[in-house]
Amino acid sequence: MTQLALVIDLNVCVGCHACVTSCKEWNTSGMAGYMADDNPYDADPTGTFFNRVQTFEVGEYPCSETVHFPKSCLHCEDPPCVPVCPTGASYKREEDGIVLVDYDKCIGCKYCSWACPYGAREFDEHQKVMKKCTLCVDRIYDENIPEAERKPACVRACPTSARLYGDVHDPNSEVSIAIREAGGYQLMPEWGTNPANHYLPRRKTKIRIHEDELVRSDNPLKKETDRPVGPIDEPTLDDVTSW
Amino acid sequence: MHPAFSVIFLTTLIGAGQGLFLALYTSESYAAVKLLPVQSGAFYAWGSAISVVLLALGLITSFFHLGHPERAWRTATKWRTSWLSREVIVLPAVLGAIAVYGAIHALGWNLTIVGIDTGVSNDLTLIVGAGGVLLTFTLFLCTGMIYACIKFLQEWSTWLTPVNYLLLGTASGFALATVYASLFAPELVYFLGGWAIIILLAAFVTRSASLIRNARLKPKSSLQTAIGVRHQTMTQRSQGQMGGSYNTREYFHGAPMWVFRSIKWVFLVLVFPLPLILLSVGINEASFTVLSAAFVIQYLGLLAERWFFFAQANHPQNIYYQTIS
């Protein structure tokens, strides 16, 4: 069974908000639209977003790190928001695991947003229905778009490739390999929601060179011999040409 | 959570309506086994009418909570998984059962179904009423479970939640029944008022238990689990927006801390000791004024109680919204 999801690399995310704006741009003009923006230039701006980038300071200044944290619907494999919906407007697709809201069935009771521990759902004050990330379901299957571009808008927009997209149930997909090899983890595992979206942790990028890495101490095929050393009294240019 | 007044009125109104019906049926079944004097059909009929009005008012206020009330009929479809859907089905059923119960009394249909010789002249109402009682208890369960089934809202996720809904609603309904009886059936005032006090004391025990439990709760989620970074010192520097959003409005009560703290004591005084004193005095004097004061004060207290119930629930998503920028 397919479970499409995003894997977000916190080590690479620079917090530029390109995913936020491209998400809003795509979805406000797509089937989810429009996504309201009230008082965008006034004192109390507010609006509907499917994706946000938050920033956290880890540690204490000056020994601190900045973690930019993109946050959207995690398309849980056991989504708590789905069974609570009284009308069936909130549902998880069998074929690809995307959690969606049927805007024509939603009565706007907001119960599903209470039942999401991540606060991934936002109520649209104008259309009076609950909205959330659709994983660009109207884009990833659109055959009018070149195949390479059939990815969620946020993934396409990310300038640092911090967002990977694919099937987390396919063990050989890019996302599964990233989760497996780069320590991918889920958010709030304590509630058993089993989110499909994973995050890759921050990594140390220092190169640590140990002594034994410079010399092939084991020399398995006997291909390397000791370096030739010339007579000690001759003038040298460097180690090699000294003889 | 942000307390919605539509839901506050819905739960308190239907609680009182259900409790009133339970009180009427209790007095009728006691009369059936000759423990209480039998009342006229009109007594039960008008009592049921008040109960139906309260439930209908509750149902109407609940529509104000919906973004698309015209689609409300769809809520009856997912009763297999959703407690909200179950409540939506059971609430009209309770309303209908109580209406039928009252109508049989009003029309005086003295039908004997079971045929046991009872103190009341017929047992049709007792059978219909028993079904109504069953539905009433189911409705209390549904209402409570809507909140208790969300496991990460730890303040709600306890068996005390449905029990509190049951006991507080029943206490309020029995108080209303006592007021009603003080006008039309003074011989029932002792009985109904006594039960109102007993249920009120039981509700005090369970509501206090849930307050104590909630005060000792340790949140399971933390910033560490929320973003998956295990450092002990972390602060939010930006929540991705400068203005507010649904996330900052819906999940926080929005009242100053001193209001939040004082509401707890306001409801504890208005719901429990004051009505207790007024009920005790009112029963002895069979005074309509004192008893109705008890009911009204308790109802106002229950509004505050419900507000506090919602406001106290701390949603884990708030972890993501601690600092604007």
Image: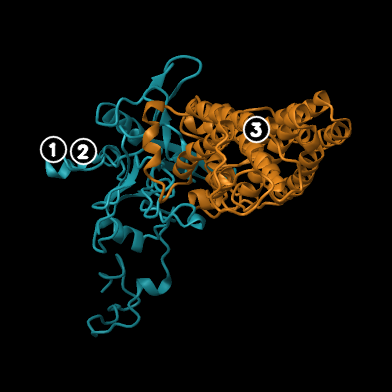
Instruction: Give the camera-side residue of B35 and B287.
Output: B35
- Of the residues shown, which amino acid type is indicated by label 3? Trp
Q: On the image, numbered disc 2 is attached to which residue?
A: A139
Q: Secondary structure at mark 1?
A: loop
Whether residue A126 is visible: yes
Q: Image quadrant of residue B263?
A: top right
Q: Chain of mark 3?
A: B
Q: On the rendered structure, is A141 left or right of B200?
A: left
Quadrant of residue A173 within the rendered picture: bottom left
Display colour for chain B: orange
Secondary structure beneath dot 3 equals helix
Please identify the quarter of the rendering in which residue B187 is found.
Answer: top right
Q: CA distance from mark 3 to mark 1?
A: 51 Å
Name the mark nearer the viewer: 3 or 2: 3
Could you tell me the amino acid type at mark 2?
Arg
Residue B21 lies, with reference to residue A230, above or below; the image says above
In the image, B311: left or right of B181? left
Distance of mark 2 from mark 1, alpha carbons? 8 Å
Image hue for chain A: cyan
Name the residue beneath numbered marker 3: B307
Q: Disc 1 marks which amino acid?
A: Ile
Q: Residues within 10 Å of mark 3 (few under 14, many from 20)?
A: many
In the image, residue B218 lies at what x, y percent?
A: 66, 53
Q: Is circle 3 on the same chain as circle 2?
A: no
Percent position of residue A113, x then y? 46, 39
Number of labelled discs? Answer: 3
Q: Mark 1 falls within which chain?
A: A
Mark identifier at residue A145: 1
Where residue B20 appears, as percent x and y from the top left, is 66, 36
